[in-house]
Amino acid sequence: MNQQIRNVAFAMPLTNPAFPPGPYRFINREYFIIQYRTDPEALRRIVPEPLELTEPVVNYEFIRMPDSTGFGDYTESGQIIPVSFRGQTGSFVHQMYLNDHPPIAGGRELWGFPKKLAQPKLAVETDTLVGTLDYGSVRIATGTMGYKHRALDISAEARKLVAPNFLLKIIPHVDGTARICELVRFHLEDVTVKGAWTGPAALDLYSHALAPVAELPVLQVLSAKHIVADLTLGLGTVVHDYLERSAVARRGAGSEILTETHPG
């Protein structure tokens, strides 16, 4: 029976998982990214070691995903922080909000994406690209940009998209303690940028107890871009285990430790 379960187990629930196995391909994925300067002390309280801050900026993202393998049609919004890890520059995914259950479940279970349910939108309104994020009935983010004012170098934008991304994956034990607490690295793969543009932009963030995007305040909008691309979301690798010492201690005390298998 144990082997039978191991042969079929992939995700929750056992007999009808919330999402299929990958790879996960996205067609016409549309990004609206506003980079802004923020309070460096606020960033230091958020970014986990051994990641290091590179500059006091945040990338606020609205993302439309109209065609994604297994996950369907949905929209996402959240904050990404530029960081470095052992000399390698990349981005730390701080918080994300989206409107579709399979990518919430898959993102949290597989990679450790910090995803919560909300209502983001991204659309063109006459001459303006508009991104909004509502948590329940409360508006917590509004971003605007002049639509396709100036083209960007698509090769340069493709190189940026394949840079490493980092996540803090936390899975609790049945007693409420952390069973998994790891720093995960993943990459976007097979990226084809179909278009990239910039224009004048603005971003407003609003306080909310359960969606604290405003805790990284907007001090100055630095740039904005609108990108359309096809890409594959690659699986991850564990680059740091925060529980490694405690696991060794439990083994030394004779506790039962189950071996964890990681994707990638």
Image: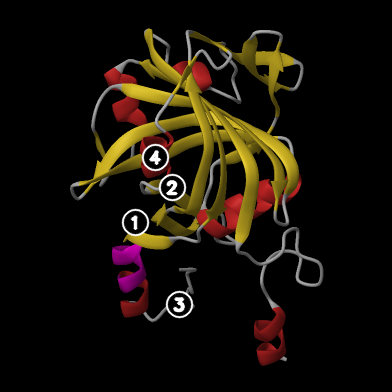
Label 4 near label 2: C-beta < 8 Å?
no
How many C-alpha atoms fall within 10 Å of the one at disc 1: few (<14), some, or many (≥20)? some
Question: Does the magenta stretch mainly form a helix, a strand or a loop?
Answer: helix
* Residue 216 in view: no
**Residue most extreme to the left:** 87
Q: CA distance from mark 3 to mark 2?
A: 24 Å
Residue 145, by quadrant, is: top right
Marks 1/4: CA distance?
36 Å
Task: Read off the residue under disc 1.
Answer: 242
Q: Earlier in the sequence, mark 3 or mark 4?
A: 4
- Residue sitting at 62 percent across and 64 percent down? 22
Residue at horizontal 75 percent and vertical 22 percent from the top: 136
Expressed as whole percent of the image width and height from the top left, the position of residue 111 reads 52, 55
Looking at the rendered structure, the secondary structure element under dot 2 is strand
User: Tag 4: residue type?
Assistant: Ser
Amino acid marked by disc 2: Leu
For the point 70% across and 56% down, which residue is it?
69
Looking at the image, is mark 3 or mark 2 nearer the viewer? 2
Residue 237 shows in the view: yes
Amino acid at circle 3: Ile
**Image spot of residue 171 (x, y percent):** 53, 56
Q: Earlier in the sequence, mark 1 or mark 2?
A: 2
Residue with the mark numbered 4: 155
Do the CB atoms of the residues marked 1 and 4 lie less than 8 Å apart? no
Q: Earlier in the sequence, mark 2 or mark 4?
A: 4
To which residue does mark 2 refer? 167
Disc 3 target residue: 257
Q: Quadrant of residue 138?
A: top right
Left or right of 260 in this view: 208: right
Image position of 52 (left or right of 119):
left
**Residues shaded magenta:** 242-248
Residue 261 versus residue 58 in the image, above or below: below
